[in-house]
Image (cartoon, rainbow, N blue to C red):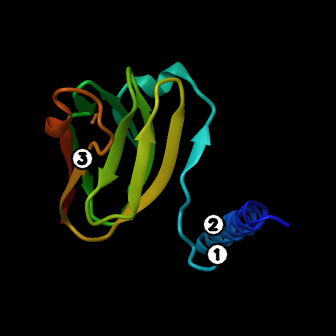
Amino acid sequence: MSLIDRFEKAALYLTGALIAVFVFSLIYARTRLNQEVSECVPFNKAYLEPGIHRIDSNTYQIYAVASMWRFEPSEIRIPRGSEVDIFLSSKDVVHGFNIARKNVNLMAVYGSINKTTIRFDEPGKYEVVCHEYCGIAHQNMHTIITVQP
Ligand code: CUA
């Protein structure tokens, strides 16, 4: 067996092991740590209409739409203790959606809807930034989620 074959075999084993670790981590986070894992939902044009929908006293759905170079709705206010489903899409290129101090890191992709659920127990302002380079004004693309006491 040549040296290259040995390296190739080692690389394949390492790749397989890493994939196993990633899949295990995902399942562990979802089942044992009860972490919400983001998901794709079937595309529907209704999600491109930005808005905040109140489902009940502490459940909200946010249809967040990214475009060059802003997020809509431009202002998000929710009460403390809210559980929020975020449905994220883009009107043009790929954008990012990262909520500071929260474990939320989504990609906004044209023609698809990414969803995650998050709970806001601490009042305050949560900055949302675009973390995917999306053009000349990428660095200005941010919004704020205000959690009211
Ligand atoms: Cu949008 Cu960077």
Asked whether 29 or 21 is in front, the reply is 21
Residue density around tag 1, few if under 14, some if 14–19, many if 20 or more, within 10 Å? few
Q: What label does residue 28 carry, if any?
A: 1
**Sequence-earlier tag: 3 or 1:** 1
- State the residue position of label 2: 22
Residue 143 position within the rendered picture, expressed as x and y whole percent measured from the top left: 19, 43
Rendered image quadrant of residue 19: bottom right
Residue 30 position within the rendered picture, expressed as x and y whole percent measured from the top left: 62, 69
In space, the residues marked 3 and 1 are separated at their CA atoms by 28 Å
**Sequence-earlier tag: 1 or 2:** 2
Q: The disc labelled 2 sits on which kind of residue?
A: Phe
Residue density around tag 2, few if under 14, some if 14–19, many if 20 or more, within 10 Å? few
Ligand 1 quadrant assignment: top left
Say whether residue 55 is visible: no
- Residue at the (52%, 23%) spot, across then down: 111
Rendered image quadrant of residue 23: bottom right
The residue positioned farthest toward the front in the image shown: 2
Asked whether 91 or 77 is in front, the reply is 91
